[in-house]
Image (cartoon, helix red, strand yellow):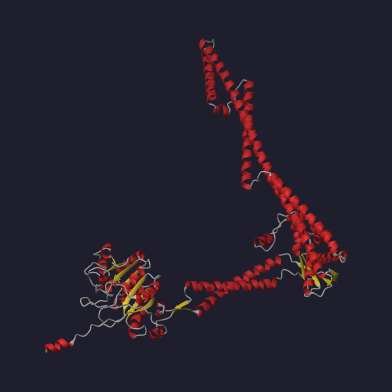
Amino acid sequence: MASPRSASMTRVETDLAALAMAGLRALPYVLAVAALSATIVFLLLERMAPLYRADARIAVDIGTTDAGVARSVLDGEMQLIRSRDIALGVVESLELSKSAEYRGALAGDSVMRSILVILGLARDVSDLPPDERVLAHFAENLRVVPTGRADGIIVSFWAADPDLAARGANAVAEAYVALRDGATGETAASLADEIARLRAAVADAEAHVAALREAASRLPTGLDAESRAEVEAELASVRASVAAAESEAAAIRAGIAGGTIPDTASIRADAQASALFDEQRSLREALVQETAANPLGNPRIAEIRARLTEVDAALEENARRIAGALDATAVRGRERMADLQKRLADADAATAAAADIAAAEAAVADVQSRLDEALKREDALRQSGVLPDEVRIAARATVPAAPAWPDTAPIGIAAFVAILLLGLTIAVLRELASGRAFRRLPFEPLAGMNSSVAAAGRLRRVEDEELPRAMPDAPSLAPDAEADSSLGEVADSVAGRRRIIVTLAEDSDADGRPLAAVALARALSGRDRTVVLVDLQGDDADGAAMGESAGLPGFSDLLSGDASFAQAIFRDRRSRAHFIPAGHAAIGAEDLAGERFATLLTALDHTYDHVILDCAETVIPGIAPGADAALVASEHGSTDPRTIRAAGQIAKVSTAHIFHLKVDPPRRPRAPDPAPKAEAA
């Protein structure tokens, strides 16, 4: 069974000429951007410090004819050249830590190196000790590779100073040759002694790590940066409060000794002391007033003085109590300070223990690497019974005349080409995204239909003598099994299209019409889609099939404003689909072109997933331009001129995707039996 899409009346192709023109239009701008970018890259590379490379060649004579064994021995020798012992010796002999290049490595990472670290192209050495930074920088600048045959090794060394590059390569080669000359007569016994010593060193280092971990497990857990900041802030706050309490207590005691209680914050905060303080001030003011009024004295002055003496005594007692409370607060604060300081000290101890463990683990890894190297050499001895018979420097490194990196010209050209291609790609993608690079082919009646097979959709036609319309066999209104299958394909194909028109390609004298719109609405409703069928045929066949009688308000009443949506929308009795009858009045071409018609369809578009318009050929020019899909139902094949004419009428005014649904022809009534007429005659 052919897919319904095979009968589409339109097709879209990519316009390669439009894509080429888009690239040509963007070419001047892309060339300018690419040239500017390449210039920037070139200038940046020119500002970078150049690196020189010097190569020293070492000849390695291996007394074996087995290529695999020789390669294994050569790999072991290259590992030996890259070993830490040789690196330490070369760094010390050349005093690399004092050179300008390696002083930069000690000072910290440069901006370029930070970028390379972020990109994962360089190792982050910011946490390493200074000596380890020098060794890491040395290892990055050293390259050891075999020659084409298993009889030589090339030692390459990179440096910003060409003389240092040559001296570095020669120093590494000389250190290796000296080390190997002392071990040329190495035997299995000497290797066994070295391996035993290294294994003991590994065991001691691992035991040391275990002891450090055991000691660290007894320490409190450390503090992260946020927790440490909180503890330090609290410690500063407690220290300030203790100092304030002690200072205020001292001021109160000094005031008591001097006979004047100071007006401090704590005294004011104490209700009793504050009241006594206010009363003392009031009594003193009253005493001054009475003394001024009666210089010779009177009983009132004596009474005020007696009360003032009592208040002074009570205020002094309260001041001593407040000073004692401040002392207690200071003591508690100092205890809290001690706790916080202990937490910080414990955190520092935990951090130091973690650093010690990390250093011990690094030492274990170093000893383990040397042990692994010795085991490899022992394995090579076990396999071949020999080590290299002789190693010598075949060619010493010379001072390079030109830098090996950066090679500005190739890199600049590569940047120019890459940005040029990227810009053209972006221009083409923008053209594709805008839709201007696609062209819709015009409707081709015969060629379009002959190039595909008609969709196998079928609907049975059943005529009723009382109502000339298509009806399925009773008691079901559903199409037969074959129609279900093909109609389901059509329903799946239009699932993403909102507004669908359904029309017929039939002879004018055909009996009845197939209810393709009703069948499509029910098929879409069965797929959990909200559907409304608008009957623009005007014969009430859709309404009768969906369970409603004629004479109901419908779409024409909506157009005239005589009915609302609630009065004109009905429910199908056999599905969840809704339908709107044609209405009481006829719908003319001026109604279809009016703003009211477009507003009603827009409202339905926003309410339902699909709006199906069942219409005749006469109204297609008015409603087809806004449709997303069209279904041509016909009892003829897809190549029949009547089917092509109906599809072409839609394609002339709309870009909707057109589907063809083939229905069964009507069953003609049988001719009457002539026998009774003969008897009557």
Q: Quadrant of residue 160?
A: bottom right
Q: Residue furthest left?
A: 681
Q: Is residue 31 depicted above or below 111 in this figure?
A: below
Left or right: 567, with 390 as reference point: left
Q: Residue 642 at x, y = what percent?
A: 32, 84
Q: What residue is at 56 percent from the left and 73 percent from the top?
A: 425
On the question of residue 101 being in view, the answer is: no
Q: Residue 259 at x, y = what percent?
A: 62, 20
Q: Foreground: 179 or 186?
A: 186
Q: Is residue 213 depicted above or below 497 in this figure?
A: above
Q: Quadrant of the N terminus?
A: bottom left
Q: Quadrant of the C terminus?
A: bottom left
Q: Foreground: 333 or 366?
A: 366
Q: What residue is at 69 percent from the left and 41 percent from the top?
A: 345
Q: Residue 498 at x, y = what percent?
A: 37, 69
- Total of numbered circles in the picture? 0
Q: Foreground: 48 or 376?
A: 376
Q: Residue 5 at x, y = what percent?
A: 41, 77
Q: Foreground: 71 or 231?
A: 71
On the question of residue 441 being in view, the answer is: yes
Q: Is residue 193 depicted above or below 331 in this figure?
A: below
Q: Quadrant of residue 60?
A: bottom right
Q: Quadrant of residue 330?
A: top right
